[in-house]
Image (spheres, rainbow, N blue to C red):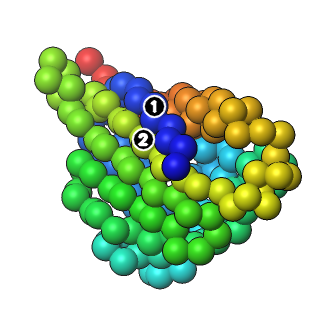
Amino acid sequence: MPRVEQAIEIHAPPVRVFAMVAHSPERMPDWWEAFELQQRVTPPPTVIGSRSRYVYNMMGVKIKGEHQVEVYEENQHLIVRTISGIEATFEFRFEALPDDPESTRVTIMVDYALPGAMLGKLLNRLTMEQKNERDLNQALVLLKALIESQMPIVST
C-alpha cells in the first residue's frame, strides 16, 4: 500500500491547527486542493464515528466516497479511514514545538490503495505517488498560510 508523509511547522498553537483540521472538515478543499468536496454526513461536533462525504481528484479521476473518524485525541491526533470509495487512511499528528509552544508541528500520513482498473486509468504508479507527494506538500503549505493569516493582531 503506498504511503505519503509530510510535516510542516505552523506558527499557531495546536488547539487552533487541530480545530481547522478536525472541527472544520468542510474547509479541507480550502487547503488541500485535490479535495473538491468535503461535506459532513453527521452533525458537528467531530467525534469518533463522525462521517464525511468527499470527492478527491486524483490526476483527473474523481473519486467519491465517505470516510469516518476512528481516532480522536483533542489537539493531538486524528485518524480518518475511508468506508467507501478507495481504501485509504489519513493520520494527522499535532505537536507543540518544545522551544515555541505557540507553534505546532503538523504531520500528515496517508496510506492508500487503488483498484487495478483505476491504476490503468492513471499514467503509472510512480507518477501517481509523486503527484500525491506534491499534493500533500502543497496542502500543508496552504494550511500553514491559511492558519497564519488568521492570526489575531496583537497591539503593543
- The x and y percentages for residue 53 are 60, 72
Q: Residue 55 versus residue 16: which sits nearer the camera?
A: 55
Q: Is residue 143 visible?
A: no
| Residue at which label 1 appears | 6
Question: What residue is at 46 percent from the left and 57 percent from the top?
Answer: 89
Q: Identify residue type, mark 2.
A: Ile
Q: In what element is the residue under mark 2?
A: strand
Q: Quadrant of the C terminus?
A: top left
Mark 1 element type = strand
Nearer the observer, 3 or 37: 3
Query: Viewed as shown, does residue 114 lie left or right of 121?
Result: left
Write down the quadrant of residue 137 in the picture: top right
Read off the residue under disc 2: 108
Residue located at (52% from left, 74% from top):
83
Residues tagged 1 and 2 counted as in contact (Cβ below 8 A): yes
Identify the mark nearer the N-term, 1 or 2.
1
